[in-house]
Image (tube, rainbow, N blue to C red):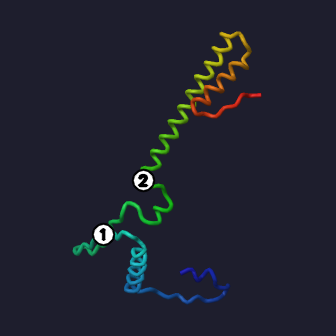
Amino acid sequence: MFNFLFRRRGETVEVKTETQREAIERTMTELNALLDKEPVMPTITLDPNTGEISLTLPEQLSDEALALPAPGAADGTTEAAEGAVEKVAEAAEDAGEVAKDAAKESGKSAEAGLEKAVEEIKDAGGSATKPS
């Protein structure tokens, strides 16, 4: 099909026309080869009035199963990740308030409040270090 890419300039190219019969035979051979690779065969419907051939394919073909996550699996993961991010964000806000309150109540430096805030974030499952 792409033989013209590999010819030299000035060379004549032999053009072979494909008859309808050859085109149909080639298409059916290619389709059968593709369907043979699938573990689950699709439903093939032939409409005798129009001559239309249609395929009802499974929801996920074998090459799609290798490339994509299972349907619905990504939704649960995303929700869990969003929930974890919200939890850590809330803990950080609470820790900031605790740090302010601790600094006010104890009359100590803000450093003592920061240490308490870092502890609160770690307790909530987040990752935090005290700034130096």
Q: Residue furthest right?
A: 132
The quadrant in which residue 51 appears is bottom left
Q: Residues within 10 Å of mark 1 (few under 14, many from 20)?
A: few
Question: Residue 42: x, y in percent?
Answer: 33, 69
Q: Earlier in the sequence, mark 1 or mark 2?
A: 1
Q: Is residue 132 left or right of residue 32?
A: right
Residues at marks 1 and 2, CA–CA distance in whole angstroms: 22 Å
Residue 92 or 29: which is nearer the viewer? 92
Residue at image point 55% right, 90% down: 14
- Residue 65 drawn above or below residue 50: above
Residue ID for mark 2: 71
The quadrant of the image that shows the C terminus is: top right
Q: Secondary structure at mark 2?
A: loop
Residue 13 or 2: which is nearer the viewer? 2
Residue ID for mark 1: 43
Question: Residue 12: x, y in percent?
Answer: 61, 89
Q: How many marks?
A: 2
Residue at image point 71% right, 19% down: 112
Residue at image point 65% right, 15% down: 102
Q: Is residue 66 left or right of residue 130?
A: left
Q: Amino acid at mark 1?
A: Thr
- Residue 25 drawn above or below residue 126: below
Q: Secondary structure at mark 1?
A: strand
Q: Amino acid at mark 2?
A: Pro
Question: Residue 26: x, y in percent?
Answer: 42, 82
